[in-house]
Image (cartoon, helix red, strand yellow):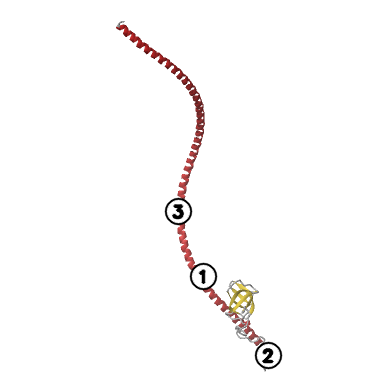
Amino acid sequence: MSILTKILVVLLSIFSILLCGMIVTFVGNTNNYKAGLENEKHTTSVLQADNATKTELFNAQVKKTEELQKKYDTDLQAIEGERNNLMADLRTAQRLAQQYQAQSDSWKGVLGGFEQSVRNLQASLSQTQQQLDQARAQGIKDQKDLNQITADLYEKIVQVQSMEAERRRLLEQKTELEKQIASSPTRTAAVQPVTPLRGAAVPAQPSGAGMDIKGLVVGVDRNMATLSVGSADGVKEGTVLHVTRGDRFLCDVVVTNVDINQSAGVLELVQQAPQSGDTVSTQL
C-alpha cells in the first residue's frame, strides 16, 4: 500500500470520526432545539396570557387614568374658577384695605382733635370743679347767713307782733279815756285797758330744770322743721328736741328760731325723715 493511500485512509478515518461527531452533535442539538421550541411555545403561551391579562389591566388602568384625568380636569377648572374668584376677592380686599387705610388716617386726625378737645374739656372741668367748690363754700356761707337772717326775721316779727299788741292796747286805752272824758268831764277815772299790758315778747323760761317740753312737727322743708311749741312752752334758741314716731327715734331738731307758740330748727342725726304729726320732746 502506498503512502498516498495510507494518507487517504487516515484522512478518511479522521473525516469519518469528525462526521460522526458532527452527526451526534446535530442529533443532540436537534433534540435540544425541539425541547427548547416546546419550552419557547409554552413560555410564549404563558407570556401571551400574561400579556392579555396585563393588556386588560393596562386598558383598565388607561380607562381609570382617563376618568381621573377628566376628574382632575373638572377639579382643575373648579380650582381655576375659585382661584379667579379669590383673585377678585383679593383685589376687592386690597381696594377696601386702601379705603380703610385712608379712613384710618382720617380717623387718626379726628382722634387727635378729640384728644385735644378732651384735654380742653378736662381743663374746663377742673376749672368748673374749682368754681363749684368755691360756689359750694359760698353756698354754705350764704346758708349760714340765711339762717342768721331768718333768725333775725323771726325776732323782728315777734317784735312787730309785740308792737302791734301795744298799739292795740294804746288805741283801746285812748278810746276808753275819750269815753270817760265824755261821760265825766270834771273827773278822770283810772283807765283800765281792755287788752292787758304785755311787755316785749321774750322766750318763757322753763319752770324747772327737768321740765319736759312736748309737741308735734307742724311742717318739714328740706333740713328745717317747724314745731308746734314756742317760747310760751319753754323753748329757747339752741334747745334740742327729739323727734319720734311711736317708739322709733327719727332725728333731732336744734331750735334756731323761736316764736310765742311756734319754733323752727335744723334737723340733725337724721335716721329717717320726719313728717307732720310726729312727736317732739326734750326727753326720750
Q: Secondary structure at mark 1?
A: helix
Whether label 2 touches label 1, CB < 8 Å: no
Q: Amino acid at mark 3?
A: Lys
Q: Position of residue 91 (x, y in %)?
A: 47, 42
Identify the mark nearer the N-term, 2 or 1: 1
Q: Nearer the viewer, residue 127 or 86?
A: 86
Q: Residue furthest front?
A: 1
Q: Position of residue 21 (x, y in %)?
A: 38, 14
Whether label 2 touches label 3, CB < 8 Å: no
Which residue does the image show at 52% across and 73% down from the upper left? 140
Residue beneath label 3, please? 108
Question: Is 276 placed left or right of 50 in the picture?
Answer: right
Q: Which mark is residue 136?
A: 1
Q: CA distance from mark 2 to mark 1?
A: 64 Å
Residue beneath label 2, please? 180
Question: Is 207 placed left or right of 75 in the picture?
Answer: right
User: Badge 1: few (under 14), some or many (20 or more) residues near its Cα, within 10 Å?
Assistant: few
